[in-house]
Image (cartoon, rainbow, N blue to C red):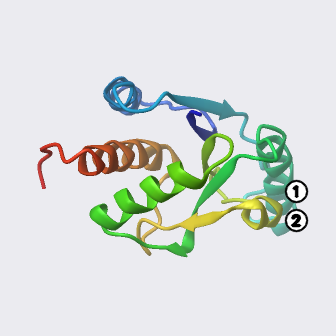
Amino acid sequence: MKQKIICVGKLKEKYLSDGCAEYIKRLSAYQKTEISELPEVRVYEENSISQINLAKEKEGENILSAIKDNDFVICLCIDGKSFDSVSFSKEIENILLKARGDIIFVIGGSYGLSHKVIKRADLKLSFSEFTFPHQLMRLILLEQIYRAYKIKNKEKYHK
């Protein structure tokens, strides 16, 4: 079993790439973690709801094609369930016990996730009611996963 983060779009800023690489390295002591970057679908008319919906659907198809039937899927959604760090650690521990496949975290693109992807989720996870850039969210997610493993293993980590 491994955990994978499926992301729409590539990281553009070096500080985000460096931060993500650091947390993936730290996580290797606990769980193999991979990042899968899928292409972002361009929207040419920023205010076109139909183009935005088409982009989300196409990105959703790409996301779903990267997920196997037995994977445990966690979608990052603003309307998902919120945890504190200790509760999130316990949730990860429970998922590790019951998951039959890989653990898949999904971060959508600029316009969010398609309804089909959200429907596929075994858990909808929210970090805040704030909206974060999806590229920054990748770093935040990796840090929280790392923190969860430190807590789970009763290892010291700053508060």
Q: Looking at the image, how many numbered discs can be counted on the residues?
A: 2
Quadrant of the image containing the C terminus: bottom left
Q: Secondary structure at mark 2?
A: helix
Q: Where does the image place residue 51, in percent across and percent down from the top left?
A: 85, 58
Q: Which mark is residue 50?
A: 2
Considering every residue shown, the one lying at the far front of the view is 97
**For residue 132, above or below residue 8:** below
Give the class, few, some or many, for how many residues have Cα within 10 Å of label 1's Cα (few <14, many ≥20): some
Give the class, few, some or many, for how many residues have Cα within 10 Å of label 2's Cα (few <14, many ≥20): few
**For residue 48, above or below residue 134:** below
The structure residue drawn at horizontal position 33% and vertical position 42%, both measured from the top left corner, is 146
Depth order, front residue of 49/129: 129
The structure residue drawn at horizontal position 68% and vertical position 42%, both measured from the top left corner, is 101
Q: Is residue 139 left or right of residue 34?
A: left
Front position among marks 2 and 1: 1
Location of residue 49 (image quadrant):
bottom right
Q: Where does the image place residue 45, in percent across and percent down from the top left?
A: 79, 56
**Spatial separation of the CA atoms under disc 2 and disc 1:** 6 Å
Q: Amino acid at mark 2?
A: Ser
Location of residue 150 (image quadrant):
top left
Q: Where does the image place residue 44, in percent across and percent down from the top left?
A: 79, 49
CB atoms at circles 2 and 1 under 8 Å apart? yes
Q: Which residue is mark 1?
A: 54
The structure residue drawn at horizontal position 33% and vertical position 44%, both measured from the top left corner, is 149
Quadrant of the image containing the N terminus: top right
Q: Amino acid at mark 1?
A: Leu
Q: Secondary structure at mark 1?
A: helix
